[in-house]
């Protein structure tokens, strides 16, 4: 019986002492809210779980591909079709290139696309 009274008294004492930590709890909740709103966590890397509530859409991926072309290359984006994990991208380079130069351009574009969207498999079509 003595042990039961000691345990109940200790539990009462611990809960009574814990009442003054409301400011710490508020600060902790504020920090978690900031982390939840942090938009750096995305599903760009297929090895990491998506921690945001926002799901990426095909139009978001197409806009990202277009942005990569505009920022990293001197070329103009053309038709972009995304189906599943495949993306077919047409790029207008502005002049005619031979086969070796086209392969080099396609390789550079694939590297840039994979850096921006690693979960997609790109099929690049280069047109003059």
Image (tube, helix red, strand yellow):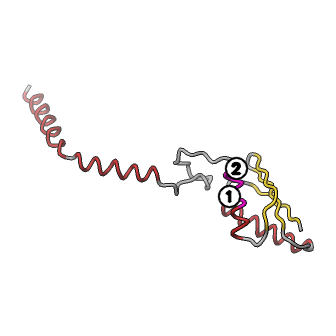
Q: Is residue 61 magenta?
A: yes
Classed neighbour count for the residue bearing mark 1: other residues with Cα under 10 Å, few (<14), some (14–19), many (≥20): some
Measure the alpha-carbon separation of dots 2 and 1.
9 Å
Report the magenta residues as a range. 58-66
**Residue, disc 2:** 59
User: Image point 13% across, 33% down: which residue?
Assistant: 7
Quadrant of the snapshot with the N terminus: top left
* Tag 2 and tag 1, C-beta contact below 8 Å: no
Which numbered dot is residue 64?
1
Q: Position of residue 21 (x, y in %)?
A: 21, 47
Left or right: residue 122 compared with residue 71: right
Front one among 19 and 100: 19
User: Picture quarter containing residue 120?
Assistant: bottom right
User: Image point 51% across, 55% down: which residue?
Assistant: 39
Left or right: residue 94 compared with residue 122: right
Q: Main secondary structure of the magenta part?
A: helix
């Amino acid at each position: 019986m003595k042990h039961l009274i000691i345990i109940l008294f200790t539990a009462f004492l611990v809960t009574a002492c814990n009442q003054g930590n409301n400011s710490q709890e508020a600060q902790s909740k504020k920090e978690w809210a900031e982390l939840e709103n942090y938009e750096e966590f995305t599903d760009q890397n297929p090895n990491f779980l998506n921690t945001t509530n926002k799901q990426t859409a095909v139009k978001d991926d197409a806009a990202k591909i277009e942005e990569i072309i505009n920022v990293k290359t001197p070329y103009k984006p053309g038709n972009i079709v995304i189906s599943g994990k495949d993306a077919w991208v047409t790029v207008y380079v502005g002049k005619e290139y031979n086969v070796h130069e086209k392969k080099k351009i396609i390789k550079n574009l694939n590297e840039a696309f994979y850096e921006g969207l690693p979960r997609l498999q790109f099929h690049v079509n280069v047109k003059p």
